[in-house]
Image: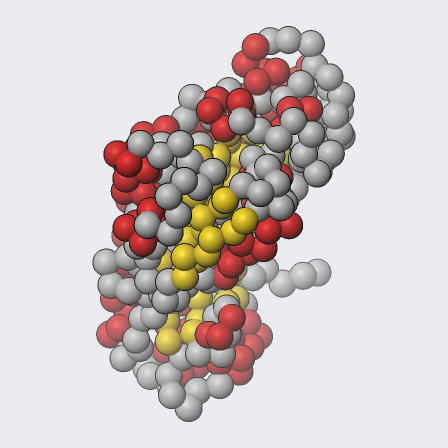
Amino acid sequence: MIRERHLLGPGPSNPYPEATSALAQPLLGHLDPEFLRIMDDTCEMLRTVWGTTNTRTLPLSATGSAGMEAAFVNTVHPGDVVVVAVNGLFGQRMTDVAARCGAEVVAVEHEWGHPVDVDRVLAAHPAPAIVAAVHAETSTGVRSDIAALGAALRAQGSEALLLVDAVTSIGGIEVRADDWGVDVAYAGTQKCLGVAPGLAPFTIGERAFERRVEKPRSWYLDLGMLGGYVGEAGVQGGQRTYHHTAPTAMVASLHAGLARVLDEGLDAVWARHRAAGEALQAGLEDMGLELFAAEGSRLPQLTTVKVPEGVDSAAVRRELLERHGIEIGAGAGAYATSVWRIGLMGRNARPDTVLLVLAALREVLGRG
């Protein structure tokens, strides 16, 4: 038997019980009418969570990283200028994926731990095809203002598509794709949505779809082909065309997780994450620890904290796991050994989890 873990790192998080229970339901075929009903209902709930009316909103049958790849392979034409705001590891990955698609990448580098500077991003190139940014940078615990970036692009009269990574933000903090002018966005199921890893919630607007690559480099992630099976096919009520064998149990689990979130209400879920994050950050500072992310831009669902001088980061994380069954994350990149990442996502965004991780960390660090 595997001992249950308190998954309090950067992801995955412990799933909502409803999402776990759904995995045990009878397995359905991917063209079964009952499954197609579940899939269509899931897409509709995803529209609500994304804050969009996009007909092409669907769970891709892959993890969030494939969502990133789908976003770029379907929108980047060879030679397109793609401006990427880089303020952490996942901004860096965007530059890599865009370059592999043949883009001329303009990376706007920021200090890690700080939000995206909208003015610098807009000044990076006079006429990019795409501007890409990470909403909630998982590597640093920083939130960037996507609403301001979208508004600035519109005010400038830019024709650029706005492409957004919302892997750590969706289901945890406010996301309003349509209001913010987001054209393409992707996420993952394993963080604030409270579902196991395996699907990538994805949305693409009409403007971006009209400008898509007709025959992208990826057959599997070709949104034009996928649309005949899921997404707009469900909205339009047309004949479904076979594309791939969808992971039906995972979609049923996402369906249950989304229903759990929406039953609570998005505003209430965001407030719960905010309260838990603020309590954790206050408790860490009361313990004498220093937070890493810039004040005013800290994510509530993922807190980054500096490892104290003279403390072995890996040893602390190992002791938390072995003695208390608590997983927290190491830092990323240059901060791998000097920062911890503590996630309070999905069902873990609650007061008892805050008390648990603070008590365990205080004991391990000898700060009781």
Q: Quadrant of residue 213?
A: top right
Q: Quadrant of residue 250?
A: top right
Q: Check the image and report above or below for 316 versus 233.
A: below
Q: Check the image and report above or below for 267 versus 35.
A: below
Q: Check the image and report above or below for 20 versus 365.
A: above
- Tally of marks: 0
At x 74% / y 25%, what residue is drawn?
243
Image spot of residue 284 (x, y percent): 30, 71
Image spot of residue 106 (x, y percent): 47, 53
Q: Quadrant of the N terminus?
A: bottom right
At x 39% / y 66%, what residue is drawn?
112
Image spot of residue 253 (x, y percent): 59, 36
Q: Quadrant of residue 79?
A: top right
**Residue 60 visible here:** yes
| Residue situated in front as seen by the camera: 176 or 362 | 176
At x 26% / y 73%, what residue is drawn?
285
Q: Quadrant of the C terminus?
A: bottom left
Q: Most extreme residue toward the bottom, as rendered?
A: 310
Image position of 257 (left or right of 353): right
Image position of 198 (left or right of 345): right
Image position of 57 (left or right of 355): right
Image spot of residue 99 (x, y percent): 59, 51
